[in-house]
Image (spheres, rainbow, N blue to C red):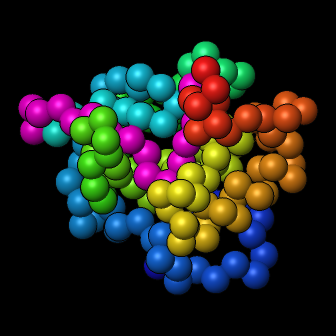
Amino acid sequence: MTVIPDGYQLAGLLIALPDAPASPASTPTFRCVDVPDGDGALLEHAGQRYTMRLWGVDAPEWNQPFGIQAKQWLATRIMATDLHCSTLTKDRHDRYVAHLIDSSGRSISYDIVHAGMAWHYNTFAPDAHVLAALHQDAKRAHRGLWSAPAPVPPWVWRDTH
């Protein structure tokens, strides 16, 4: 079952979706020790460190509008926090792509998209219906990066800068 954090006004959304995060009880606990950017984290578990990328999202690059705000938002949300992690794969930069869940069951990917600090990364999470709905909700509400007149997705920004 997909955990939709309180406060997300998603009327009519089906809950049993393919982008359901794992139950926190079924995954080990990690501690966030660093946030290098708006969609990445350095997590520690049992004395080992792991470089993680948030599943299903793409945050602005540090040198693009809202890049620093996205990093700050994520750091405030997860720094020194216990997290549960469902690792899905590794990316081309050898980072683990993971769905991070806090101790209360809230999805970090859902939260950052809902706050308007990242895009739903449809290319790598095409069946993530909750993320798509949260993305559209943030866009309609002009939250975060959606308050800018014409926000440029990070994948376009990277190609042009």
Name the image quarter holding residue 88. bottom left
**Picture coordinates of residue 75, whole percent (x, y):** 49, 27
120 left or right, relative to 23: right
141 left or right, relative to 157: right
Name the image quarter holding residue 154. top right
- From this viewpoint, is residue 105 visible? yes
Judge whether residue 155 is colored magenta.
no
**Picture coordinates of residue 54, whole percent (x, y):** 43, 45
Up-down relation of residue 20 to residue 64 (above or below): below
Quadrant, the C terminus: top right
**Picture coordinates of residue 119, whole percent (x, y):** 64, 46
74 left or right, relative to 45: right
- From this viewpoint, is residue 60 visible? no
Residue at 78%, 35% (x, y): give it: 151
146 left or right, relative to 91: right
Up-down relation of residue 105 to residue 91 (above or below): below
Residue at 69%, 58% (x, y): give it: 134
Residue at 27%, 49% (x, y): give it: 90
Q: Residue furthest front?
A: 160
Total numbered labels placed on residues in the image: 0
Judge whether residue 50 is colored magenta.
yes
Task: Magenta stretch: give its range.
Answer: 46-61
Name the image quarter holding residue 79. top left
